[in-house]
Amino acid sequence: MIVFAASDKGGTGRSVTSANLAYHRALAGDDVCYLDFDFGSPTAAAVFDVPDARQAAEDRGLHSYLIGEVGEPLRIDVWSDTEHRVLRNRPPGSGRLVLMPGDLSGGEFATGEENLRRCVDLLLRLNGEFDLIVVDLSAGRSYAVDMVLEATSKREMRGVDFRWLVFHRWTRQHVAAAASLVFGKRGIVAGGVARGHDEDALRSVIRFVRAAVPDPESPLWSQVSATQSAWMRECDRDLKQMSSALGIGYTQVLGSVPLEPVLQWREQLITDEDVLDSQIATRETWDALSDLAGRLTDDKYWEQA
Amino acid sequence: MAATGRTAPAVLVCGETRTCLLPSFQALDGRAAAQLLRLRADEQVSVSERPNLYALSPELLTGVDCRLPTANGAKVRAVGTVASRAALTEGRVLQASAWFSVPSAGPDTRRPWGHYLVRPGLVEPFGKLPEQATAQGVLRGSSRGELDLGMIAEGLLAQLLRHPLLDHKAPFKSRRTHLRWVARRAPAGEGASLERFTLAEDGLRTVELSLPEETPATAAVGLCEDLALHDWLLTTLVHMLDNSRLGAVDGPSAVLALRPAVDHLLHLWMPQAHVERTLGRLWDVLEREPGFTRQWQTLVQRIRDQLAVQAIPLLHEALSTR
């Protein structure tokens, strides 16, 4: 199963959340590969805390592979190469967790038949090897988005299951932007249909993830005044209405991730130690990530609404 | 290592074999295997059904003009052709190999392509070949700009994976293995020997052979493909057993996780099925140490025992509800 992580804007927590999902699946025993297709601003090495990899990937990353400069993109075994104190101890029963970083110097580039073929070859190959492949795509209707839309429309990829997660923050602008990224005139669905995807089939594999969602009921806000509290509830309600009017309402949402300072500021994987021992991250965040990770492959959440 | 024409005889053969599970829900039969491996219109795929189903593609040639990988950084330009081929065992395990032979010395100028084309699989160095450094360089892996056998083998594998026959619904996930090998020429009068077999990280294996001059390069390729196949089987089965958490998890779930092994792997073990007789005895070295077949049989026995243990309660239940 390939999961493409997209977002209309930067700062939606797309990279850090999708990396956490990869981590949760690996903890649960899946062999997981995380591909940093965020050309131009590769961040995965920082999220997985593999600083050496950053340097190593200078010219051997996914970007160099796609433009044909190297035969194979660099692979980093996160469990063994991370400097993260907790991640270094690979738990028994966990699956592999492999990172394919982007190049430090690689920017966006024009799509070509050769790049596309290499992209298809890589995805086919990884599909045989990993239970889950998470592809973190650059924000917006980027080249990376076009390339994977094109790749997944190819006959060779017919047998490969894929799903899309579109991340957005819980604000009016982000909700509108996410809807437009998917359903807009130049959106993912239109772009996919232009490349030969079946519209209904493509729609049925796209779900939204609401990130950094402040829960008005959360104890975080227990000290706010009654007016503020009422206002928050109203905003939340308005956003829900707006979302469903834009076609990204409840049935299209795979899950929400609460507003979590650790995700916002540290942009790293949240481990059980962060929740249980140092308690810098909340249990709600851990559970939300864990639920999301489970739903990625739970067909119940992907049935046509 | 027979040489052709006026070129000096080859002193070194280098190769790489990549092995993976065929990404297809069902194993391919002989006819489909021949279709898959039909890499050239002008040559047939050889398919043998005894002692197991084995299909071998015709050879392809890739023209190269680049530096050889060398362990000591020596810059040796070489020109010629790299041969490659693919094999499919029991319609289940797919392998792609790329290899070249190289003589101890070559001319200092590049010759017309016709010269190289009549010497398939031969790469000629400019000047003298640093034999030891090249062998070590190949085993270590190529840097950018150097002749990269892995890239050629991978390219062939990628081409095969795009074939419309394949549905990419493999019954289980598995890693590829890469086996890099070098065969030096044995001193006159000495027979073939397997000098070293190592397991490195990330599915990399290396083999060092010493072969008499008259051994053809394709015999070495066949031997290394056979080693790679069985090493892949062992690697894959060990990984599957690890993942199943057999012994740690109770109940039938661990055993059910091993079902794909029973369905698709256990019947594939057949060392030397397609190895030239003169090289077959090199297998004996590996059978003694580390003991390939011994390990395989232990794993298989373990799976069968677990299946039997899990079956007992079912049997009991069936008898008591009668």
Image (cartoon, rainbow, N blue to C red):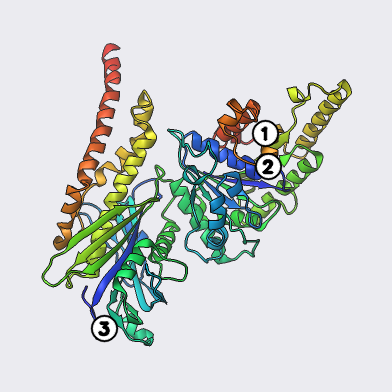
Label 3: which residue? B7
Q: Are marks 3 and 2 on the same chain?
A: no
Q: Position of residue A209 (x, y in %)?
A: 67, 38
Q: Are marks 1 and 2 on the same chain?
A: yes
Label 2: which residue? A13
Give the residue at x 62% y 61%: A106
> Is there a contact, CB below 8 Å, between mark 1 and mark 2?
yes
**C-alpha distance separating marks 3 and 1:** 68 Å
In the rendered image, the residue lying farthest to the left is B189
Q: Position of residue B85 (x, y in %)?
A: 33, 65
**C-alpha distance separating marks 1 and 2:** 10 Å
A149 or A293, which lies in front? A293
Instruction: Check the picture and name the quadrant holding the C terminus of chain A.
Output: top right
Q: Position of residue A166 (x, y in %)?
A: 67, 43
- Which structural element holds mark 3? loop
Residue at mark 1: chain = A
Answer yes or no: is residue B60 visible.
Answer: no
Label 1: which residue? A257
Answer yes or no: is residue A20 visible.
Answer: yes
Identify which amino acid the numbered label 1 is placed on: Val
Quadrant of res A204:
top right
Identify which amino acid the numbered label 3 is placed on: Thr
